[in-house]
Image (spheres, coloured by chain):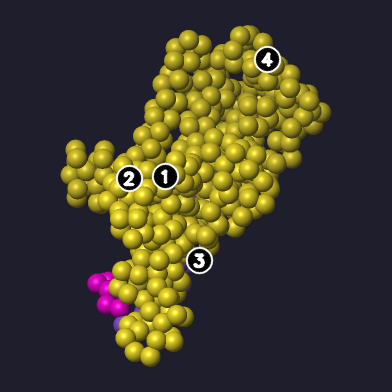
Chain colours: A purple, B yellow
């Protein structure tokens, strides 16, 4: 049971970590595939 | 696997596979006729080279001193070039992806996703649940024969159980959020409202994109830990010949993993890897095209020729790469979900004592002898592996 809970906690930790890292790395379609002349209604 | 390849190939080659007709175009001077348009609307495939190749003559126009409009390319010719992806489009941002202004693969993808994918995928899952319910009603729970010994052996160590639950938990989350993404519009929005569906989709997308990394980590962990135990062996043949003891009362000998568990393991590893790779390709759009290269490899092997198909297209737009990645990701996801439903069944209500192996990690010797006798013999050589503490209690 302890291993199961540890596994589930690890899922949450990995997901939060991945989200943070990818956000900081700028991996979003609007950042990857648009130029500065393109207006996007993106709230930052 | 063959069925999956067939499905994919059908998807790609569906249009060219139908009969070719060559209507009389003399009345239109070689241009497309009403018959062409009607035939296309009826879903027939036509030789469209009269349009595909009719995109102007810039080289010939260069010699014309004047009135060589647009370098020998008229408006219709220019639009045809855009339509077939041969126009010389240059963009200031977005790279190759942005140069594709028109591509009709999108509508084929949309139709397949909204039609056969939902339909057959949904029936696969419901059919699997129905089969398991019928099997349970007919066979009931597989009980441990005889008395429990009160002695337990360690079936899975803590690190093994951690890897299993990391993979299992993430897969369940990915499965649920994937199903919401695919079925939300038709199963949630009409009943709970668009706002609820939108909120679920937004949350589901976050979960799907980020929990994917836990799934990949779990996949690597279980592969490293269990691959050696899951190589095929001669004992698998005996296990298969007796249907693993699930049907009837025989209990064929098995090592740590029986043939059924090996099928689950390799399904998870192979399908899971393919799902993971296509998932990463979808996470980073257009950065990791997979299918043109894969199709070229399959063509080189000669597989399409052996099956009487034409060569698979290796000239895919970046958008088509994404469309194929999404469909392959979803098809394999459905297949793996169906397999895992059976795995969850046998690991919970289907077999007495099976859950203990992944719950506490310890199983009663009687259970181990019944289901994994060869493994028990190996493990009993290690006196530390057998414990007289915390005996498993028989469920009633």
Confirm or deny contact between disc 2 and disc 1 (CB under 8 A): yes
> Residue under mark 1: which chain is it in?
B
In this rendering, position of residue B264 left or right of residue B350 = right
Name, please, the residue furthest toward the right.
B381
2 and 3 marks on the same chain? yes
Whether residue B122 is visible, yes or no, is: yes
Image x and y of residue B33, in percent? 30, 53
Q: Nearer the viewer, mark 2 or mark 1?
A: 1
The disc placed on residue B39 is: 2
Confirm or deny contact between disc 3 and disc 4 (CB under 8 A): no
Q: CA distance from mark 2 to mark 3?
A: 37 Å
Q: CA distance from mark 3 to mark 4?
A: 48 Å
Q: Nearer the viewer, mark 4 or mark 1?
A: 1
**How busy is the neighbourhood of tag 3: few (under 14 within 10 Å), some, or many (20 plus)?**
few
Tell me which label, 2 or 1, sits earlier in the chain.
1
Establish if A29 lies above or below B6.
below
Secondary structure of the residue carrying tag 4 is loop
Q: Which residue does the numbered mark 4 point to in the structure image? A: B242
Q: Nearer the viewer, mark 3 or mark 1?
A: 1
Q: CA distance from mark 4 to mark 1?
A: 55 Å
x 39%, y 40%: residue: B117
In this rendering, position of residue B250 left or right of residue B39 = right
Secondary structure of the residue carrying tag 3 is loop
Tell me which label, 3 or 1, sits earlier in the chain.
1
**How busy is the neighbourhood of tag 4: few (under 14 within 10 Å), some, or many (20 plus)?**
some
x 41%, y 35%: residue: B121
Q: Which residue does the numbered mark 3 point to in the structure image? A: B287
Q: Nearer the viewer, mark 3 or mark 4?
A: 3
Q: Which residue does the numbered mark 1 point to in the structure image? A: B21
The disc placed on residue A33 is: none
Whether residue B163 is visible, yes or no, is: no
Image x and y of residue B239, in percent? 70, 20
């Amino acid at each position: 049971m302890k291993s199961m809970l540890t596994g589930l906690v690890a899922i949450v930790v990995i997901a939060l970590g991945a989200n943070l890292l990818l956000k900081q790395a700028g991996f979003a379609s609007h950042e990857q595939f648009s130029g500065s002349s393109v207006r996007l209604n993106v709230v930052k | 696997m063959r069925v999956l390849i067939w499905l994919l190939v059908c998807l790609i080659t569906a249009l060219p596979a139908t009969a070719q007709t060559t209507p009389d175009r003399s009345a239109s001077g070689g241009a497309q006729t009403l018959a062409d348009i009607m035939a296309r609307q009826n879903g027939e495939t036509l030789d469209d080279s009269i349009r595909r190749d009719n995109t102007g003559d810039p080289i010939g126009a260069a010699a014309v001193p004047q009135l060589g409009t647009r370098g020998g390319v008229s408006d219709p010719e220019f639009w045809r070039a855009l339509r077939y992806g041969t126009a010389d489009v240059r963009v200031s941002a977005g790279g190759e992806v942005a140069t594709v202004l028109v591509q009709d693969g999108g509508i084929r993808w949309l139709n397949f996703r909204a039609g056969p994918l939902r339909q057959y995928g949904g029936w696969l899952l419901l059919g699997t649940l129905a089969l398991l319910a019928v099997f349970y009603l007919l066979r009931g729970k597989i009980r441990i024969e005889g008395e429990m010994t009160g002695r337990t052996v360690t079936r899975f160590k803590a690190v093994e159980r951690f890897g299993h639950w990391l993979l299992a938990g993430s897969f369940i989350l990915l499965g649920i959020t994937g199903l919401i993404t695919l079925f939300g519009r038709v199963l949630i929005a009409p009943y709970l409202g668009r706002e609820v569906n939108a909120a679920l989709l937004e949350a589901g997308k976050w979960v799907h994109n980020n929990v994917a990394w836990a799934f990949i980590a779990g996949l690597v962990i279980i592969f490293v830990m269990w691959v050696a135990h899951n190589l095929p062996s001669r004992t698998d043949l005996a296990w298969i010949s007796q249907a693993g003891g699930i049907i009837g009362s025989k209990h064929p000998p098995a090592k740590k993993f029986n043939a059924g568990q090996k099928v689950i393991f390799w399904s998870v590893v192979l399908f899971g890897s393919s799902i993971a790779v296509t998932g990463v390709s979808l996470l980073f759009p257009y950065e990791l095209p997979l299918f043109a290269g894969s199709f070229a490899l399959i063509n080189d092997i000669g597989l399409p020729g052996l099956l009487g198909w034409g060569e698979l297209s290796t000239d895919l737009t970046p958008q088509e790469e994404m469309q194929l990645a999404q469909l392959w990701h979803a098809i394999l996801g459905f297949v793996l979900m169906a397999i895992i439903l059976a795995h969850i069944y046998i690991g919970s209500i289907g077999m007495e004592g099976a859950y203990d192996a992944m719950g506490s990690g310890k199983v009663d010797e009687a259970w181990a002898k019944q289901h994994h006798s060869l493994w028990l013999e190996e493990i009993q050589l290690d006196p530390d592996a057998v414990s007289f503490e915390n005996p498993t209690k028989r469920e009633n």
